């Protein structure tokens, strides 16, 4: 079964609206009752924390900007310089932007892009509370970014790109907005093998960063086709889905695939240079 079948059977616009709706709901939750613990990628029904990366070790971390929706630490490997310009794709409540802002300093500039109005509002509120005037949050589609050509030194993203159906457009857009010699550093979810249809077709799993994933080879292939060089996987972790989550989507095909270990879900952090 083609891993692209779920995105193509539903229109791209519908997928985006579903993701936008779910993440809008998460943004409106009180931080104390967030669906996830810090540094995880979760199903939006609040039941499952799949990953646990410790953001608190990073300078610039702000707990109330961390909604626990990541799958890695791209800013740990991003090589952002003082005075640099950074774009964060799927910026959410602003956590990675605030960490990037710590790295670029007062003389740098950070732009966060998100297509969920509630997330933009939450991020702007968090930035205002801290008096940050060199971070700008823009509402927009990361397949058609509201950023000028050759603007950014670095592009970062954390468990967002696999939510969207057109990876080819996204990586070409990343290439467009980067300066010559600039680079991206992205944490995301990929698949080794074939994800059972019963899992790939679950909208909750899609929004929870799993079902929209493509294979690792396809993912690296899209990066290469966009023109990037020196592509490097900096970190890779297997993700074990909890039994109670799997039972929610139990079917003959999923049981067989799980028992035979015919697929792996993997968190990767990857970097490439323009």
Image (cartoon, rainbow, N blue to C red):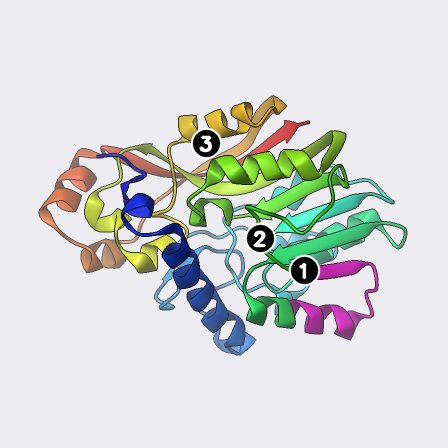
The answer to whether 190 is drawn above or below residue 113 in the figure is: above
Q: Is residue 34 visible?
A: yes
Q: Estimate how packed mark 3 is, as few (under 14), some (14 to 19) or many (20 or more) residues with alpha carbons within 10 Å.
A: some
Q: Earlier in the sequence, mark 1 or mark 2?
A: 2
Magenta part of the chain = 123-138
For label 2, the residue is: 54
Q: Earlier in the sequence, mark 3 or mark 2?
A: 2
Q: Tell which of 96 and 181 is nearer to you.
A: 181
Q: Is residue 186 above or below residue 62?
A: above
- Which residue corresponds to the image point at 34% horizontal and 66% vertical from the top-left? 47
Quote the CA–CA distance across marks 1 and 2: 27 Å
Whole-number angstrom distance, CA of label 3 to CA of label 1? 26 Å
Residue extending furthest top?
A: 230
* Residue 219 numbered mark, or none: 3
Q: Which residue is mark 1?
A: 138
Where is residue 114 drawn, in percent x and y? 59, 58
Quadrant where the image shows the C terminus? top right
* Secondary structure of the residue carrying numbered label 2: loop
Q: Residue at x 50, y 76 (%)?
A: 29
Question: What percent of the width, then of the height, locates residue 96?
Answer: 65, 54
SS at badge 1? strand
Q: Is residue 128 magenta?
A: yes
Residue drawn at 17 percent across, 45 percent down: 254
Question: Which quarter of the image is occupied by the N terminus?
Answer: top left
The answer to which of marks 3 and 1 sits earlier in the sequence is: 1
Q: Which mark is residue 239?
A: none
């Amino acid at each position: 079964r083609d891993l692209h079948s779920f995105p193509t059977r539903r229109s791209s616009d519908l997928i985006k609206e579903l993701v936008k709706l779910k993440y809008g709901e998460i943004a409106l939750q009180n931080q104390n009752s967030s669906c996830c613990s810090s540094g995880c990628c979760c199903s939006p029904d609040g039941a499952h924390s799949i990953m646990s990366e410790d953001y608190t070790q990073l300078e610039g971390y702000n707990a109330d900007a961390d909604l626990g929706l990541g799958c890695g630490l791209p800013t740990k490997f991003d090589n952002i310089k003082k005075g640099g310009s950074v774009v964060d794709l799927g910026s959410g409540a602003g956590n990675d932007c605030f960490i990037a802002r710590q790295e670029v300093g007062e003389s740098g500039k950070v732009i966060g892009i998100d297509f969920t109005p509630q997330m933009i509002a939450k991020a702007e509120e968090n930035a205002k509370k801290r008096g940050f005037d060199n971070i700008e949050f823009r509402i927009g589609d990361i397949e058609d970014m509201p950023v000028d050509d050759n603007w950014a030194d670095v592009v970062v993203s954390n468990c967002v790109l696999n939510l969207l159906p057109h990876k080819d457009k996204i990586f070409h857009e990343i290439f467009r907005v980067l300066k010559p010699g600039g680079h991206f550093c992205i944490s995301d979810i990929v698949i080794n093998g074939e994800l059972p249809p019963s899992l790939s077709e679950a909208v909750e799993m899609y929004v929870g960063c799993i079902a929209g994933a493509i294979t690792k080879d396809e993912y690296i292939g899209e990066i290469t086709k966009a023109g990037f060089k020196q592509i490097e996987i900096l970190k890779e972790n297997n993700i074990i889905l909890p039994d109670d989550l799997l039972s929610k989507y139990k079917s003959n095909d999923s049981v067989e695939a799980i028992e035979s270990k015919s697929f792996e879900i993997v968190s990767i952090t990857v970097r490439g240079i323009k």
